[in-house]
Image (tube, helix red, strand yellow):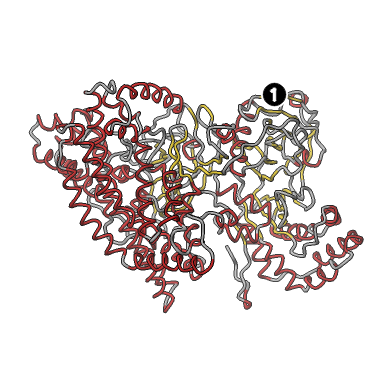
Amino acid sequence: MSPTTGSENRSLNVLTPSSDERLTTEWAGGKGKNLHTLTVSGFQVPRWSILGLDVFAEFCRGSGLDEHLARLLDDGWESRARQIATEIAHLIEAAPLDDRLTDAIGLAYGLAGGGAVAVRSSGSQEDGARHSFAGQFDSFLNVRGLGEVIDHVRRCWASAFSERSLRYRAQHALPPDAGGVAVIVQHMVAAERSGVLFTADPTTGRTDRHVVSAVHGLGEGLVSGAVDADTVVLDAATGEPLTTVIGDKQERHDAGSGPGCRVSPVADEDRATLSLTAVDLARLHEAGVRVTAHYGAPQDIEWAIAEDTLWILQSRPVTTLAPAAGPAPKPGGDLRIWDNSNIIESFSGVVSPLTYSFAADTYAKVYDSYARALGVRGEQLREVREWTPHLLGYVHGRVYYNLFHWYRMVRLAPLYPLNRRVLEKSLGVAESISDEVADTLHPFTPRSGLRGRLSRLARTVIFVGRFLTIRKSVEMFRRDFYRAYAVFNNVDYDALPGDETYRRFRRLQRELIEKWGPLQTLDATILLSVGLLALLTRRWLPAAPEWFTWAAAAPGGAVESAEPVWALRELAALAHADTQILHLLEHVPDSEVHRALRDAGHTRFLAAVDRYIADYGYRSPDELKLEVPDLRENPAGLFTLLRDALPDTVDGRAPDRGGEADAYLDQHLRGPRRLVYERVRGKARAALADRERLRFCRTRAFGAAKRMLRALGRDLARAGAIDAWNDVFLLRLEEIRGAYEGMIAHTELRDLVVLRRRQLAADTALHAPSRFTTRGAPYWSGNLERAGWTSGPAARTGARELRGVPCCPGLVEGAAVVTDTPRDIGGGILVAYRTDPGWVTALPSASALVIERGSPLTHVAVVARELGIPTAVQVKGATTEIRTGARLRVDGAAGTVTVLADPPGDSTTVAPDSPRTETLP
């Protein structure tokens, strides 16, 4: 939020978790930037707001203090630190505070929740990788009331020029900084236990150790050295306690009735025992692993526990790390970032080797074709072909984006700086790479001089041409696609000889898949148009809610990918009109419903069911996983979805989100700017609609390939190459190709199947991180161990409020249904780690969606907006912290999920009650 500063038309930055990352980086100071990063990454952080560095700058300008600072901090300031500090403190205390500044401080106080708050300094260089400035600036606890908050904000500003902070700068050869500090206003946590967690031993430098210090009450006693704390050293890999030292803990610090802390004695029995339980230590270890993995370096973490919730108060790099004795050599080789982002929408959990190898081969062919469509030739094309086969990685059975290669792919098109930012949004990447790293990523070695400029110009001209004619290209592609698809679709592949099925599979790859490449210009069009739309929204509609851009860009009219939803509702309407059919759906097992309907003579309804399967039978949960049967092979799943379709919404249509965006624009944007905005918006909406249509084509192509490869599995089983037809999923595509092309002996396949089955069983037991980095060969040199691959599920932290990215507005209260399949939602709030396009038929049975991974541009998110279902995506920890039956409040406009009540008793499956829904403006 940015309150306007009156006649000068200047804004003061009062930053919150929803603030733009660029503004936070520029104005929040080091500590504030880390708070923002922790919060948006899903860590449980007490409510906060930040008065940006520009607020202090405005204070200096308005009071004339900036001239005094320039004079006092001139040459020779090092020898006058005490005098300078005293004089600046007096000037800051006496300088007038105008209404704009008072309003900004009041706003910050309100955004932090009012009541008791901590007022904390955040220097621009604080908590950096080289200099921590630990203890150099002031922070104040338990500050209450706006008057006290204003006084303590002044004191924080003065601490930027305190004697100790000036001497710290002199000691580290740092120049004085007249920019002062940002000020954090943060809700006070009534801590029962507090402390510090180092994710490396700061005294020995060992990174295989975590060191926890803990006291009762607030951490002020520990930080000030007044309390002798407990200390526990943990094994960094397992979390097992290695050594424990019980501190004296003679007193505790708690919030009193005024600023500061109330000190009271600790009972003898509490002094003699460890202040942390085994559960506390496990949660701290898990949090330390996550925070360290997120930042990629050992961290000094301040934490507090209150009402069974572990709060992260701040995190900074350990800048005083001593060199470890006999350090293990760091892995060498290329740096890679692995991120499952929205690829998990298509390939969730452990994926078969056949599914991965088919997907990787498809991506390689498509993006090779895309590069050629943009005019890449010769040596440059050979360089592109070095990385296109590796766009996807396969780690312990999971599919990941090999992220650097995707930046290289985006750079094939013009406007790379804008497109890479939108790429990160569209993929759902939680953490951007630095500009310095991004600038080093090229699809091929860039040419210099005139030849290089001509090459880039030629590629840009080709791209612009394809950009301007993309709608026509999509229509031509769809026409050709469906003409070819009809040939591949109406074939009984089990009746064909195996080599003929293999020949047709290779033809499908050439005629349906490889021709997809030029259509990737559509993805570039989406990145460019949505990026421009977001840019215009930030500049011309700075007060627009966070969900607005996605609503404005939402495709108008009926989205083709939502057709299965409407068809399912029409099918439900037929069932709802006949009590006998309803009775069968409710009381007969799904696997027997089709036979029961036939026996009861419901031929008209069965004909409608058969039409649905004929039209949409290739759709199913995990539909892109070759090992998962679709509705044609297993129609029982359709009856589960049909039973859960809400009867009272069968004839309903979604609220018009585009209409909401239009109303907002009518109120806030007119004239030439509106015309420009609508032109860009129209391009974005059309491109997103076309993408949904092409996704239908993609699913149909994968469906045809799935039937062919299953037929090949049965052929290999008949030939004795594998024991069972479904063993084919444990082979890689190149091994199947080798069997039919004479490059591999049939006798080799059985041993491969045995090996892969054993490996996948072990992989299934591992907890997979969503993002990690490796150097060199990923499986070697301890790369995966450091990345957090562990056995068993992640530990719950007890968080009661989770934050994600707003996707579709609306406010819902109801019971959570945590699931990895789109079944049995029954009107509750669907909570899932990921979704895939096959989930769209289950959406009408959900009152709200909470998705841990994904992005606002993923398939299910687009359809949810069309259906008007309140949705939040990228909600970190959702499936760990929320249990089925917990009562939730989901605010789709803010992207927040609040746990109102835990599930009754110990039940893990509780029938959801009827939610209350309110559509937000």
| Image position, residue 107 (x, y; %) | 62, 61
Q: Which residue is drawn at 28% across and 20% down?
A: 723
Crowding at label 1, few (<14), some or many (≥20) Cα neighbours within 10 Å? few
- Residue at point 79% right, 51% down? 136
Q: In this view, does 35 lie to the left or right of 812?
A: right
Percent position of residue 475, x then y: 24, 60
Look at the image and tell me whether residue 401 can be seen.
yes
| Residue toward you, 708 or 109 | 708
Q: In which quadrant of the rendered image does the C terminus lie?
A: bottom left
**For this rendering, which residue is in front, 662 or 399?**
399
**x and y percent of residue 683 in the render?**
36, 66
Answer left or right for 223 relative to 806: right
Where residue 66 appears, as percent x and y from the top left, is: 77, 71
**Is residue 214 in view?**
no
The image shows residue 338, relative to residue 592, as above or below, that is below
Q: The disc labelled 1 sits on which kind of residue?
A: Leu
Residue at left offset 32%, top offset 57%: 519
Quarter of the picture containing the N terminus is bottom right
Q: Mark 1 points at which residue?
A: 242
